[in-house]
Image (spheres, grey):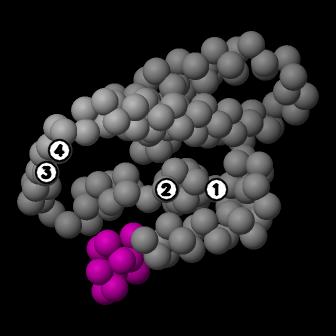
Amino acid sequence: MRSVQPLLRRYLVRLTSESNADDVLQDVLLTLCRKIFWLRNPNLFRPWAYRIASRAAFRHLKNERVRSEQVMDDFDAIEQLETEPVEDSRGILEMLLTLESIPPASRAVLLLHFQEELSLPEVAGILAIPLGTAKSRLASGLAMLRKHLGKDRSFK
């Protein structure tokens, strides 16, 4: 558990947010502890843990969206403040901010593939989606990043 905890936290921070990652991680670790006896092959622990973390993050994001919509319905007269992003070096900071605008399904594929350095078949297995779907979500996420950052940027 200790070896996978920092990796899962980093993944969850990027998938949800810094403020929500610890709550989701706690749920994930509890689930891992409760269901560890189901895992027959110890070599599959890491992908299994990412699958559980992905599902927990998606559930959290869905619940957060529903709560957010309810609050906006109740307080639709309140203006939302628009803040300018702090000017900093382009690159990593800008990409991190951009990831929040990418749908969670594509964001999960991007993070698992590029941040966690997993192959697309591994990503598809973790997220329990067909390989073709993983590829299309990766392409879609990269297209959104390119559009936001400008066409002169490329991701490999």
Which residue sits at x=75%, y=70%? 132
Q: Nearer the viewer, residue 124 or 82?
A: 82
Q: Position of residue 71 (x, y in %)?
A: 33, 30
Q: Are marks 1 and 4 in contact (CB under 8 Å)?
A: no
Nearest to N terminus: mark 2 or mark 4: 4
Q: Image check: 115 left or right of 51? A: left
Three-letter amino acid code of the residue under disc 4: Gln
| Magenta residues (range) | 145-155
**Dot 2: what SS?**
loop
How far apart marks 3 and 1 lie (CA) works out to 36 Å
Q: Image check: 126 left or right of 155? A: right
Is 55 above or below relative to 143? above
Nearest to N terminus: mark 1 or mark 4: 4
Nearest to N terminus: mark 3 or mark 1: 3
| Mark linked to residue 82 | 3
Which quarter shows the N terminus? top right
1 vs 4, front mark:
4
Q: Are marks 3 and 4 in contact (CB under 8 Å)?
A: yes
Q: Image check: 9 left or right of 34? A: left
Mark 2 highlights which residue?
Answer: 103
Inspect this view and state whether residue 8 appears: no
Q: Nearer the viewer, residue 77 or 25?
A: 77
How far apart marks 1 and 4 lie (CA) works out to 38 Å
Which residue sits at x=38%, y=76%? 146
How far apart marks 2 and 3 lie (CA) works out to 21 Å
Three-letter amino acid code of the residue under disc 1: Leu
| Mark linked to residue 80 | 4
**Dot 3: what SS?**
loop
State yes or no: residue 43 in magenta. Answer: no
Q: Are marks 2 and 4 in contact (CB under 8 Å)?
A: no
